Amino acid sequence: MKVGTAVVTRNDGRLALGRLGALCEQIKELNSQGYELILVSSGAVGLGRQRLRYRRLVNSSFADLQKPQVELDGKACAAVGQNSLMALYDTLFSELDISSAQLLVTDSDFRDRDFRKQLNETVKSLLSLKVIPIFNENDAVSTRKAPYEDSSGIFWDNDSLAALLALELKADLLVLLSDVEGLYSGPPSDPKSKLIHTYVKEKHQGEITFGDKSRVGRGGMTAKVKAAVNAAYAGIPVVITSGSAPENIIRVLQGQKIGTLFHQDAHLWEPTKEVDTREMAVAARDSSRRLQALSSQERKEILLDIADALEANEKLITVENEADVAAAQQAGYEKSLISRLALKPGKIASLAKSIRVLANMEDPIGRVLKKTQLADGLILEKTSSPLGVLLIVFESRPDALVQIASLAIRSGNGLLLKGGKEAKRSNTILHKVITEAIPDIVGGKVIGLVTSRDEIPDLLKLDDVIDLVIPRGSNKLVSQIKSSTKIPVLGHADGICHVYVDKSANMDMAKRVVLDAKIDYPAACNAMETLLVHKDLVTNGALNELIVDLRIQGVTLYGGPRASLLMNIPQARSFHHEYNSMECTVEIVDNVAAAIDHIHHHGRHVIFSCQNLFVCNSMCRVLYDCFHEPMDMNCLLLFCSAHTDCIITEDQETAEIFLHQVDSAAVFHNASTRFCDGARFGLGAEVGISTSRIHARGPVGVEGLLTTRWILKGSGQVVDGDKGIIYTHKDIPINS
């Protein structure tokens, strides 16, 4: 495994302690699993230069600083930096109860056959003792001068050294860690560049355009590719991947498709033609503009045709869906996922009905929202307009594809859809039925179906084509997408919905609402996850009645600190946990103010970033224990809920306090949280629920997929320094 200078150091030249700490933790885990790891680490020259510059600065007089500064000697930097680098590795590994060893080599060493033999024996001995050998080129005494790449040399940088060692020591795999996700077809900063998952020499060597060399190292990606090709075609598989992303080394060894793979047989695996994600997105945009140019009646007829096509193909859709369900059951998926996956009897008819409702709604495109007379004869209109191209990533539910596609057509947007692999056959047939019902004047490419998960990273780079990403799925899915794109993301990570039963609640009503909120569909994001009850309901026995009814229905209960003690039930591991099952947290609060505080405290988000593993490790562990979420030691990011919360009370004043002070996307009085749904809200359908405070919030229907445009109508007016114009800014009735 080779670690580049850009991974070891930050942009300011200092060591990236968080990344190094995470790297050493991965090595520790793999070492304990029996893997034999050899590390080649750059960074000595950069670290030495940074330290020597600092020493020179503190020892310089003001007069010295006025003189031209002579560049530091690179070999002196290497000598100072190597000592510091190895001291750091030794400290990090010692904290993890691992020993490491330093091996410095030069190009000329490998010309000696006895040296090679001794090198093999030493490394084998170290590995047998579970010691991590750390190699680096001994730049301090190396006789090679710039340019560094010397065709007569045996190696010329740490990338080629890593490839040479992999061959010499007969490694099973070489991992080259970079500061980007892998090899791109062009500079990673160029939105047109695509991540190459499998490098095929015959295909890619003439297509790739390399950007600048590494900001701190010698060769950057050019050197890595040359080293990878040489090793791969000599029989050592190579993966180039990011050294900044957490767990990447472990993920590579688990067989996950990340980074870029180099293999001598790669040409046998790679499909002859890759799907061009940019081409798909551009086609969706172009088709959406043709869709927008149609009349309202024509767009309505497209939706009605889609509804008819779904009903006409119900048997075919059912066959494909049943195949997906059977495969999911055989694979051992959770019951909640299988429940979301299945298109139950009557579902197609229900979807078709929703599409017809949507078709008969008022045309949302081009509506005049506000009309203003700016000046005499100068009329300004604020109008509704499609966003452009939407990327929707969703899991499990094939019915979501139908809802989203119909909403996109009604709102005039282009659409790219990526469903879960468990619903592949269902999504494929639904996409085929829908796009075949779209007339040629628009084209079926207005809705693109992304079939491979590997295409998602490329799509998330297309911020010049795609206007909005909406993830529908798990906390992990939403969090990954939010941290992986510059495109605006609309969605929610958690659905931790609360029901607060006040002391004045009608208990018959409370039982109905609480049971419905929990058991009607436990896997839904709008299902109740926490039941809050006023303390007076403990003494009058009403809480016990609620608990008995929940248990009769098969709900497993966990308590907050107060409830678990009083009711003798297991304590909940976290108030931030979304069960998505027949489980629920119960807690006792003093009053409505305490209920509101609880909802706000456990419905907020925490963003905690850190770079130094040992400085922030204890804080990260505390947060991890609280939230029980996967943790990135370089940046911990936990998203909020603020989804749907309900109060059950007969006291109108208390209800008003709750409704106006709870800052969630949806707040209810005496009604089940399960009503928070696009169809139930009369939106026709929804692309998802948004807990964002920017743009749409709550169930997102057609209006959430629109933005605004300003249209100004004049008769030759000019600004001319505002000398000849009198502004009136008079509101005009929209229908005038």
Image (tube, grey):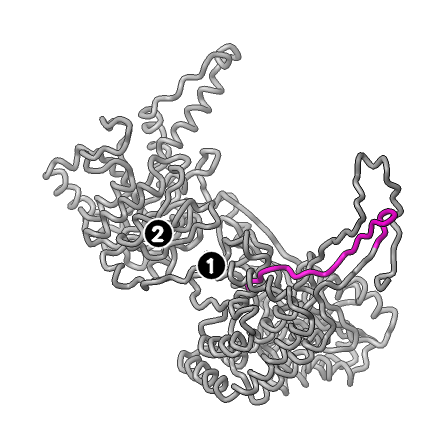
In magenta stretch: residue 383 = yes
Tell me if label 2 and label 1 are in contact, CB under 8 Å.
no
Kindly report the secondary structure that dominates the magenta region of the rendered protein.
Answer: strand
Q: Quick check: can you spot residue 562?
A: no
User: Does residue 438 lie above or below 4 as drawn?
Assistant: below
Give x and y (percent) for residue 329: 44, 82
**Quadrant of the snapshot with the C terminus:** bottom right
Residue 407 shown left or right of residue 137 in the figure? right
Q: Which residue is mark 2?
A: 27
Question: Mark 1 packing: few (<14 Cα in 10 Å), some, or many (20+)?
Answer: few
Q: Quick check: can you spot residue 328?
A: yes
Front in this rendered view, residue 154 or 363: 363
Find numbered disc 2 in the image and state the secondary structure of the residue it sits on.
Answer: helix
User: Does residue 204 lie above or below 404 as drawn?
Assistant: above
In magenta stretch: residue 322 = no
Give x and y (percent) for residue 305: 60, 80
Q: Residue furthest top?
A: 63
Which circle's residue, 2 or 1, is located before the other in the chain? Answer: 2
Q: Amino acid type of disc 2?
A: Ile
Q: Residue furthest left?
A: 114
Mark 2 → mark 1, Cα distance in angstroms: 40 Å
Q: Which residue is mark 1?
A: 279
Give x and y (percent) for residue 104: 25, 35
Give x and y (percent) for residue 717: 80, 43
Front in this rendered view, residue 399 or 37: 399
Q: Nearer the viewer, mark 2 or mark 1?
A: 1
Residue 182 shown left or right of residue 538 in the figure? left
Q: Residue at x 50, y 59 (%)?
A: 630
The residue range painted magenta reads 372-391
Q: Amino acid type of disc 1?
A: Glu
Q: Quadrant of residue 530?
A: bottom right
User: Does residue 238 lie above or below 697 as drawn?
Assistant: above
